[in-house]
Amino acid sequence: MAFEKVGVVGLGTMGAGIAEVFARAGIRVIGVEADAEALARGRGHLERSTGRALDKGRLTAEEREAILGRVTLTTAREDLADADLVIEAIPEVLEYKVALFADLDRICKPETVLATNTSSLPVTAIAAATGRPKRVIGMHFFNPAPVMKLVEVVGTILTEDGLLEEVSHLAWQLGKTAVVVGDLAGFVVNRLLLPYLNHAAVLLEHGVARRDDIDAAMRKGVGLPMGPFALLDLIGLDTAYEIMGVLFGETRSTRHAPAPLLRELVGAGLLGRKTGRGFYDQDGPAPAEAWKAHVTGVTVHGEGAEEFAARLDAAGFRASDTPDLVLRLGERPVIEHAVRHADPSRVVGIHLVGQGVAEVVSTVLTSPEAAGAAAGLMTVLGLTAVPCKDRAGFVADALLFAHLNDAVRMHASGYASIDDIDTAMRLGCGYPAGPFEMLERIGLRKVRDGLRALYAEYREPSFAPAALLDQLVAAGLPAFPRA
């Protein structure tokens, strides 16, 4: 079918962005809000967004005027009667959406497609509130909608044949990439992203590492565009908490249980950028801690010790038979090496992540002076020091490997293809590579073994390697089979 007129209900930042996307594609849009005040705010969102594009040279004045001219704003839902597609972008409260869709079902012509922009709520429950469940789908845009290229197109067991393909083609006309999925909480992106962010909050609460250091490990070490706490503040802690609650309600998996720290911050009204404070104070970044290296002698042990010792030597730190600092490179547990040393208080683990991060690992016997000196030494070498405890996976691998394991389980369940998962995370989250691309770059065996260590330490079922990953490693295969 042709989608020549599209309605958008709810003109907050997301809804106004969706309206702009359709108008940019030459489609007439009817934007609906609850009252005149909300309608004025919606108009303001549209004018500011297109105004910024004009200022940056991405739109001409004529193009901006044409886009705004295609959008009709109203407070009357009845004006949607002849729309071909109506998308709702109201708050994430199931009761509100169900009531809205029941009303849209009454107003709109029988062939109109009704779409929800929900990021986590059940599309099936929303469809069931109408007399046209075959014509109700999810169409999940990402914020900011005019910029982000991904749309998750969500079908239910009731969706009519061919409709998802038609909507996917529409997304292509809008300049978006569509990933078609079924009706599971969180769909692809949030089902993978939010447990990873929640896991970071758990590590912080358990004192494995500090907020800034966890963010640095994932941004500078793994190469993600934002650290987990900066991203949580951007998303909104209340939104993240709600999505985790929906995921937990569906799966009852401890992997999806919202972190108590997240609940506490939400209860305190510290929701991130929208309130000026969340994990970070939005007035400005916290000052970085200055690490100083007071080291007269150092010894390096473990895998890659010779090369690392040469780097230290080039920086002026000589090897010594009577060192005041002993660095242990490689995997944990560091404590097993420390207890064999004459003075375990001087032993510090070093785990290199990517090209720019060194996780500086303290055991229960490591002295604060040794840990601080090791961190300073890493800074001298041009590395970002990430102090952490001697726990399985330390910081980066603990977060990343569990995250990648979730992606393997998602694919193995038949929910989404490898290409769709990689595409969704690249376009929806700005990842430099998709989860399966990361897995194959790191090495399937290394990730599998890291997950086994996590499971052995925490006894968390979701940390056990996915069966598919185990099977590929056992077969000696370096990559996942693509259809």
Image (cartoon, rainbow, N blue to C red):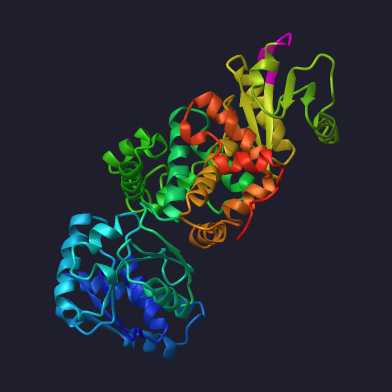
| 239 is within the stretch colored magenta | no
Q: Position of residue 206 (x, y in %)?
A: 45, 27
Image location of residue 164, percent across then percent down = 39, 71
Indicate whether 22 appears above or below 246: below
Whether 360 is drawn above or below 33: the answer is: above
Q: Residue furthest top?
A: 342
Q: Which quarter of the figure is the N terminus placed in? A: bottom left
Is residue 109 or residue 378 the one in the foreground? Answer: 109
> Which residue shows up at 21% across the image and 79% down it?
110
Q: Position of residue 82 (x, y in %)?
A: 22, 85
Magenta segment boundaries in residue numbering: 340-347
290 displayed left or right of 427: right
Q: Is residue 460 left or right of residue 48?
A: right
Q: Quadrant of residue 134?
A: bottom left
**Of the pair 188 and 317, the residue shown nearer to us:** 188
In the foreground, 314 or 29: 29
What residue lies at 52% left-to-right and 57% top-to-bottom?
Answer: 421
Q: Image quadrant of residue 48?
A: bottom left
**Can you say which quadrant of the picture contains the C terminus?**
bottom right
Residue visible at 42% across and 78% down in the picture: 170
